[in-house]
Image: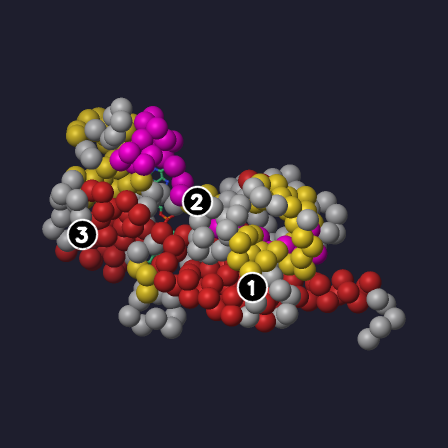
Amino acid sequence: MSVEKVIIIGSGPAGLTAAIYAARADLNPLVISGPQLGGQPSITNEVENFPGFPEGITGPELVQKIQKQAERFGARVEFDEVTEVGLSVSSFRIKTHSKEHEAKAIIIATGASARKLGVPGEVKLIGRGVSYCATCDGFFFKEKDVVVVGGGDSALEEALFLTRFASSVRIIHRRDQLRAGPTLQGRAERNQKIDDSWNTVVTQVNGEDGVESRTLKNVKTDETSTLPIDGVFIFIGHVPNAQIFEGQLEMDENGHLLTDKLAHTSVPGVFAAGEVADPIFRQSITSAGEGAKAAIEADKYLAELEDRAYPGRK
Ligand code: NAP
């Protein structure tokens, strides 16, 4: 079992920024990547609002740069997934698929995962026409017809990306007004491959070995329709990846970890940053800022821990 000063769980902008700060504070942090090295940006096509990149930057490039910066100062990034944590004593236990660790402080930056629609056929057809990542799967839909579910920035951004490959992209939104900002709305309106269905929900995804059709319902008229389709891309928000902390850390009703302004969770020595604890902003830049805060606080916590262990020494 390795004994670490600080373990950072998660490798998106929050976790990797925490790693930069913790490494520069000489804490020799260990980052356990989670199933998706780089977190959500690693499956995002274009990031246009991260300061310092006036021309924009691809999501994977952004997180690779942050990782490189963290490693330059001594952070170690391990590709592994935490399966179990024990937070009941002041030295914490973390089990991964391959190892067991002990840590004096933990920074949780496990992010969030794509929310599922929860309709029949959806889960069965994941990877066979149902997708939550246009950047990953768009290429497989060359000259095909696809629908995009959702009305937020992600739905529009991914719909625009899909027009590079697909013949047609229909946005299906449950209301008659998009949540997405005006820039993306303008781009989508100008794109001739994009069409939309308002006040409409997907009630079923149909197919055996691949998506063949989708069933829609107009929520105003209750009218239903089943039409052939090749792909269903779903972008309806995210759920925090905090299940492994259930019963050990306080959470809100949607499963986000509760923190104070200083990134402290309900257990001293355990800090949280980024989307796992942020139901509001959910931006790479705010997550990165919270990662920095969490690492600064973890450093202070460890210094105080040492002061208590050696009360006589200055
Ligand atoms: P979001 O803003 O929460 O939008 C989710 C969309 O899915 C909403 O339109 C919502 O409908 C719809 N939805 C939720 N549950 C649904 C369900 N069960 N069935 C059908 N539709 C459902 O999520 P997001 O688009 O992933 O964006 C998350 C954050 O990242 C936002 O702050 C966004 O601004 C940011 N972001 C920014 C950019 C950019 O600036 N380029 C790109 C991507 C994301 P309602 O509208 O009716 O609630």
Quickly name the residue at label 1. 75
Residue drawn at 49 percent across, 55 percent down:
11
Residue drawn at 40 percent across, 43 percent down:
114
Verify whether residue 264 appears in magenta. no
Of the pair 12 and 223, the residue shown nearer to us = 12
Residue 106 % position (x, y): 63, 55
Quadrant assignment, res 52: bottom left
Indicate yes or no: mark 2 CB to ligand 1 under 8 Å.
Answer: no
Q: Quadrant of the C terminus?
A: bottom right
Quickly name the residue at label 3. 164
Q: Earlier in the sequence, mark 3 or mark 2?
A: 2
Task: Identify the amino acid type marked 1.
Answer: Ala
Q: Earlier in the sequence, mark 3 or mark 1?
A: 1
Q: Earlier in the sequence, mark 2 or mark 1?
A: 1
Which residue is at the far top? 208
Tell me, what colour scheme is on the image?
secondary structure
Report if residue 229 is visible in the image. Answer: yes
Quadrant assignment, res 198: top left
Indicate yes or no: mark 3 CB to ligand 1 under 8 Å.
Answer: no
Which residue is at the far right? 312
| Helix, strand or loop status at disc 3 | loop
Residue 98 % position (x, y): 58, 44
> What secondary structure prevails in the magenta region?
loop
Quadrant assignment, res 284: bottom left
| Helix, strand or loop status at disc 2 | strand
Task: Give the vertical position of 59 relative to 250 (above or below).
Answer: below
Query: In this picture, which residue range is highlighted in magenta?
Result: 102-130
Assess disc 2: are there few (<14), some (14-19) or many (≥20) residues with their C-alpha within 10 Å of its C-alpha. some
Q: CA distance from mark 3 to mark 1?
A: 38 Å
Task: Identify the amino acid type marked 2.
Answer: Ser
Quickly name the residue at label 2. 113
Verify whether residue 104 appears in magenta. yes
